Image (cartoon, coloured by chain):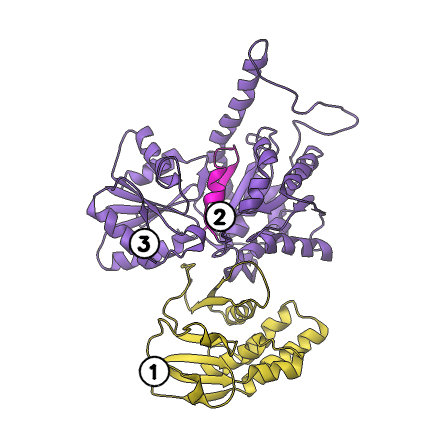
Amino acid sequence: MTVQTKAKGKIIVVDGNEAAAKGVALARPDVVAVYPITPQSSLVEALSAMIATGELDAELMNVEGEHSVLSALQGAALAGARTYTATSGPGLAFMFEPYIRQPGLRLPMVASLVTRDTLTPQCVWGGHQDAMLVRECGWIHMYCETVQEILDTVIMGYKVAEHPEIMLPVNVNHDGNYLSFGVTSCELPDQAMVDDFLGPKSINWHAALDPERPMSVDPLTGNAGGAGPSMFVRYRKGQTDAMARSLQVICDVHADWAKRTGRAHAPLVEEYRLDDAEIALVTLGSMTGAAKDCCDALRDAGKRVGIIKVKTYRPFPVQAMARALSKVKAVGVVDRSVSYGWNSGPMHHDVLAAMAKSGFVKPCVSFIGGLAGADMTQSHFERAFDIVAKGDVPPGPIWMNEKD
Amino acid sequence: MASGLLAQAMAGEGRHVVAIPSFGFERRGAPVACFMRVDSKPIRAMTNIYKPDIILCIDPTVSRVINIFQGMAAGGILVQAGKGDIERLAVPDVVSRVGLCDAVSIALSIFKRPITNTVMLGAFARATGLVALDSLKAAIEEGEFRDAGLKQNLEAVERGFAETEIHELRAAA
């Protein structure tokens, strides 16, 4: 897509963590709470430095662990603050209790998940396993492919989260190592443009900590009898409805961003060289760059192949995925994590379910690769395309780095 | 850190750069590798490199424990921290040019510590011609160095550039 580039920002050379920090600063949060964890630490260090120098006018809470990080931010959000944090792997695990409360409190925020494979075996490297473990908690999950997309999506995340029809927390996910520490140039948007794009804050119009207007937040709700069941369903249904509505809001927000910056990131699902493709691979995150290079090389050799990249993973964009899948005869889904329950990648059964829900089924191979920082190169994707082209669907997943 | 500065310098010259470091926990001084691509067009692959054209080795001892030349094709360039007889480096046949820089001695005289990073960026510029010394100095000035540290690192990159010996081993393939 060609878009007129507008409002050219300054070009900076940064890694993914610094890019996220720059995006956060442009979104002007009031409160940032932090606790270091690899491979996220340099992100909150960059934010702490910006707060120390006055580049970012925010309250920094350096607390004793991730459970306190998110608990403190919930209090801040209830008092009307725009908030941010970032975490990874074991830090996310320790944050779990307040993490699952946040969407039900309908408190919008943006938190970066700098994705890391989970213990054990002991590892500190990238993989989507941590983010996949929290895919059903009611947070919106968007995955970034490039350093620029991280910066842009952190900002867009606030606009999605704070939309009055949504009011949900957003995880902007970027791959540990390859993106968190990968250095490249990207454009730093202009502050005035971002201010205009985000508009006034709208954090806690529904529930507020205000001494003038005392309010009980999150009283005991549910059980059988009385107003309990219907009240509980009302809250839950409110969350699932807002998740469903968010797909359109995510599209609108990306379109607005593209109009202002010239950068049109696909909001839900990106179709790459798909229109006349016979087979495709479904990808997620930074692996997509090498997959696109592979796709181009195979196209040069006359093979009709394409890529379907998922940007928004929760809520799962069923219609957009089905539209993309309808163009090909067979597909391979490349997961950077495992589903222990299904002996496949987690996104593999999302794709299967999207097909079933849309009334068709096609051969769909599960590939698992890039665990714990393993590399996913052009040759890995070449082999995956070869396997999908053969048309057989093995009963279990193909482990892409098994022989590396 | 060195790769970030090199990326900044090359991007400053209008090229597309991606530098991917590879390490475990964040710990300064631990053995690390970094894979860097530079191109006139945008780079999409966020992956390591398995067939390098150039190897920049900023530690004189690391090649004793790992084969840093794996995957290199004929006509490669080695930019190596070290001193003495080039024959003792045991450079494989695929390398056609070596830039040798006694970076540890230079670093010890400037920083009083064997921090060879910016010295070897100067050596890289001299041996490869891929980036201008002025671009490296501009990147260092825009970076996190201040006061004495800035002055020392500017001196380091200049001396690395000036004091690198170029050895043409064999005609490039």
Residue A54 is marked as: none
Which chain is indicated by disc 2?
A
Where disc 3 sits, the SS reads helix
Where disc 1 sits, the SS reads loop
The number of numbered badges drawn on the structure is 3
Residue at the spot of label 1: B93
Residue at the spot of label 2: A258
Which numbered disc, 3 or 1, marks the residue closer to the eye?
1
Q: Are marks 2 and 1 in contact (CB under 8 Å)?
A: no
Which numbered disc, 2 or 3, marks the residue closer to the eye?
3
Could you tell whether A115 is left or right of B77 in the image? right
Q: Residue at x 49, y 42 (%)?
A: A131
For the residues labelled 2 and 1, the Cα–Cα distance comes to 51 Å
Which chain is indicated by disc 3?
A
Report the quarter where the N terminus of chain B lies.
Answer: bottom right
Residue at the spot of label 3: A381
The amino acid at mark 3 is Phe
The amino acid at mark 1 is Asp
According to the colouring, which chain is purple?
A: A
Residue stretch rendered in magenta on the structure? A126-145
